Amino acid sequence: MDFVANSRSAAYLDFDNDGDLDVIVNNYHDKAQLFENQANTLNNNWLKIRLVGAPEHGVNQDAIGAQIIVGFGDKGYSWRQVSGSQGYMSVHPKEQSIGLGKSTQAKVVIIWPNGKRQGLDNLKANQSYTVKYEANAVQ
């Protein structure tokens, strides 16, 4: 991104649904600008994970505070935490985007806000997953 502006906030999201994160910038007294990430030309793989909590089990509906640990390839891993907002006037999607490089599948561990853990094996790359809190998640 190479631009000059008086901006107040930015958010990242996969606007064009191609697996890489694009950026939208909110400019002061001007139009917002969308910057399209062209990393999809690298042909790398990705996952998208959206968590759904269970308030009756102490996990808020949006799973804010949950951690997602993704293992892929021989030694690759990534970590995300679901947040409500980040920065001044910025809210990112609750769906987490994770790059996998050339790996075609991943193993995921979710640490819910109540401390329980839930695991998922062999998730296929280039897919979006919605994961609901399971009451039998382990401590």
Image (spheres, rainbow, N blue to C red):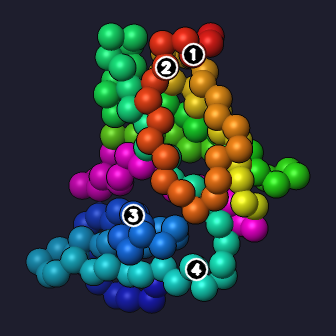
Residue 6 magenta-highlighted = no
Which comes sooner in the sequence, label 4 or label 2? 4
Left or right of residue 125: residue 135: left
Residue drawn where x is 39% and y is 63% of the image: 13
| Badge nearest the viewer, 2 or 3 | 2
The circle drawn on residue 137 is: 1
Query: Overall secondary structure of the magenta stretch?
Result: loop
Q: Is residue 4 above or below residue 130?
A: below
Image marks 1 and 2: residues in contact by CB distance under 8 Å = yes
Callout 3 amino acid: Leu
Residues drawn in magenta: 85-102
Which comes sooner in the sequence, label 3 or label 1? 3
Residue 100 magenta-highlighted = yes
Place of residue 22 in the rendered image (x, y in percent of width and height, measured from the top left): 42, 72
| Badge nearest the viewer, 1 or 4 | 1
| Badge nearest the viewer, 3 or 1 | 1
Counting every numbered tag in the picture gives: 4
Image marks 3 and 4: residues in contact by CB distance under 8 Å = no
CA gap, disc 1 and disc 4: 36 Å
Q: Is residue 60 above or below residue 20?
A: above
Q: Which residue is mark 4?
A: 39
Callout 1 amino acid: Ala
What element does badge 4 sit on? helix
The circle drawn on residue 134 is: 2
